[in-house]
Image (cartoon, rainbow, N blue to C red):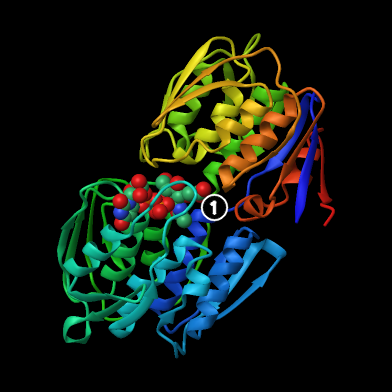
């Protein structure tokens, strides 16, 4: 296993290129199952989660090949010869459940392992299943697997109002409804940029979708979809993560390809904390406006609210901001696993249920730390950028799921950071 070692105290200067979004790519890839013609994604990130989705699609009979140049992922699902998504792959990555809707829509049957819980909470998939039932799926849960069949062999248009906003359940239902017979209306859907990206890609494949970006999607099912080439939207979470780096370490960094519209609520909060964000032709440039960062309160919410996927990184910044900040995590019940690790670096954090109170300290101190999920890991690297001495973040495989070339990107703007092999 590898670790990342950061020597704190270097101000940052320069540009960081932002990759295509992991979470968009993970929902765009299963769209290949909807057509016998090729689907090509460009600007795809090179991450272990993308490799896991590649293996899953290949296990179903899809052809998937990736070219480093331009982040091209070429996929073809001409011959789907297996309709079972195995536990061994699904347990590694919850987004695997996103093959259920498309397989069911294409061939009228599918068997997909239930993903189980994970480090940030229980994360059930009941809403995925209820939405598919509303489109005519018959579901049977047996031995840890969902056995799904479309009544009469083909899904049919239906209406479903989500009781809470779910990104994944919206995606699964949309992926299924595009090939269902008739009109589907999905209410209280997620509005994340990744959903907009999926709708655009499906439309390029010939789907009829209206309302993306609002809370209601209306889909007129078609008999078949054709091939397309689609660029993956910019990763707003990678963008926000690196926007915090110069606020923590000092200096000025330009995030190439960044747009404010992807992260308005986040930009508003960091500006309230003392950041200056400028949008230019190259991307977003970020630095401290004047003097030290100040405390702000943060409440996570579905888009367009403050993203839960930036809560840990924001907490790392607030650890050395002047004053006391309150962070309310409203999406996942157990997403403060980074707090005890930040405390080991000298942060003052009290966690009660879904609320963390952070009182800024002058300086964090480097320490050996580890994290149990992706965003928590990167928050510890951010904290290490300004900490006194050395921070060693272990279990880097979490990071490899969602951040491409962290060491190259941060050392490119002057951070002292390296990846080391752990002694066994
Ligand atoms: N939920 C249910 N039932 C369901 C589905 C969701 O109760 O059937 C609950 C969840 O437990 C959670 C809330 O609804 O409390 C919202 O979950 P959502 O379904 O929106 O999350 P997701 O689709 O599983 C995606 C991202 C996450 C991100 C969330 C929220 C992907 C692959 N994952 O997860 O990303 O945190 O949306 O924005 O798109 C990450 O990248 O680090 C990550 C965890």
Relative to residue 117, is residue 330 depicted above or below?
Answer: above
Residue furthest front as drawn? 424
Q: How many marks?
A: 1
Of residues 285 and 77, the one drawn nearer to the viewer in this rendering = 77
Residue 409 or residue 280, whichever sits in front: 409
SS type, badge 1: loop
| Residue 284 makes an appearance in the image | no
Residue ID at (67%, 21%): 346
- Quadrant position of the N terminus in the picture: bottom right
Hey, which quadrant is residue 254 in on the image? Answer: top right
Q: Is residue 177 visible?
A: yes
Characterize the local packing of mark 1: few (<14), some (14-19) or many (20 or more) Cα atoms within 10 angstroms.
many
Q: Is mark 1 within 8 Å of ligand 1?
A: no
Q: Please state the horizontal and vertical placement of residue 172, each as a whole percent of the image.
A: 34, 64
Expressed as whole percent of the image width and height from the top left, the position of residue 7 reads 82, 31
Left or right for 75, reference 117: right
Q: Residue 241's quadrant in the figure?
A: top right
Image-based side of 109 in relation to 156, left or right: right
Image location of residue 317, percent across then percent down? 60, 24
Residue 400 vs 274, above or below: the answer is: below
Query: Is residue 229 depicted above or below 367 in this figure?
Result: below
**Residue 39 percent across, percent down from the top left:** 50, 74
Which residue does the numbered mark 1 point to in the structure image?
21
Residue located at (74% from left, 24% from top)? 387
Using the image, determine if residue 407 lies above or below residue 264: below
Q: Is residue 328 left or right of residue 368?
A: left
The quadrant in which the C terminus is found is bottom right
Name the residue located 77 percent from the left edge and 44 percent from the top edge.
4
């Amino acid at each position: 296993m590898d670790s990342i070692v950061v020597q704190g105290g270097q101000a940052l200067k320069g540009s960081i290129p932002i990759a295509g979004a992991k979470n968009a790519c993970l929902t765009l890839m299963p769209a290949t199952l909807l057509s016998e013609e090729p689907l090509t994604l460009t600007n795809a990130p090179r991450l272990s989660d993308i490799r896991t989705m590649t293996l899953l699609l290949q296990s179903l009979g899809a052809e998937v090949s990736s070219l480093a140049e331009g982040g091209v992922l070429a996929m073809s699902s001409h011959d789907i010869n297996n309709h079972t998504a195995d536990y061994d792959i699904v347990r590694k990555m919850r987004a695997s459940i996103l093959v259920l809707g498309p397989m069911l829509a294409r061939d009228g049957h599918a068997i997909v392992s239930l993903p189980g819980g994970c480090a940030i909470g229980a994360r059930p998939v009941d809403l995925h299943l209820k939405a598919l039932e509303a489109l005519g799926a018959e579901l049977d849960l047996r031995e840890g697997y969902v056995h799904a069949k479309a009544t009469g062999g083909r899904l049919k248009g239906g209406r479903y109002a989500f009781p809470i906003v779910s990104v994944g359940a919206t995606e699964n239902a949309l992926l299924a409804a595009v090939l269902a017979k008739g009109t589907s209306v999905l209410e209280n859907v997620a509005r994340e940029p990744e959903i907009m990206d999926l709708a655009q890609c499906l439309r390029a494949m010939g789907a009829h979708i209206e309302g993306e970006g609002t809370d209601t999607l209306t889909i007129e099912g078609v008999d078949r979809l054709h091939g397309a080439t689609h660029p993956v939207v910019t990763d707003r979470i990678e963008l926000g993560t690196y926007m915090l780096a110069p606020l923590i370490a000092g200096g000025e960094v330009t995030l190439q390809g960044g747009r404010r519209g992807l992260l308005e609520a986040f930009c508003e909060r960091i500006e309230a904390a003392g950041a200056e964000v400028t949008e230019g032709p190259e991307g977003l440039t970020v630095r401290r406006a004047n003097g030290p960062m100040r405390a702000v309160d943060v409440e996570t919410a579905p888009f367009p609210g403050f993203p839960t996927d930036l809560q840990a990184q924001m907490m790392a910044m607030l650890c050395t901001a002047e004053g006391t900040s309150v962070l309310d995590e409203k999406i996942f019940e157990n997403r403060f696993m980074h707090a005890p690790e930040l405390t080991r670096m000298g942060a003052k954090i009290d966690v009660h249920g879904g609320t963390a109170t952070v009182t800024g300290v002058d300086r964090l101190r480097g320490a050996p730390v580890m994290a149990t999920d992706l965003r928590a890991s990167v928050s510890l690297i951010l904290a290490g950028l300004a900490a006194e001495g050395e921070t060693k973040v272990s279990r880097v495989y979490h990071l490899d799921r969602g951040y491409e070339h962290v060491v190259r990107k941060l050392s490119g703007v002057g951070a002292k950071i390296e990846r080391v092999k752990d002694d066994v």
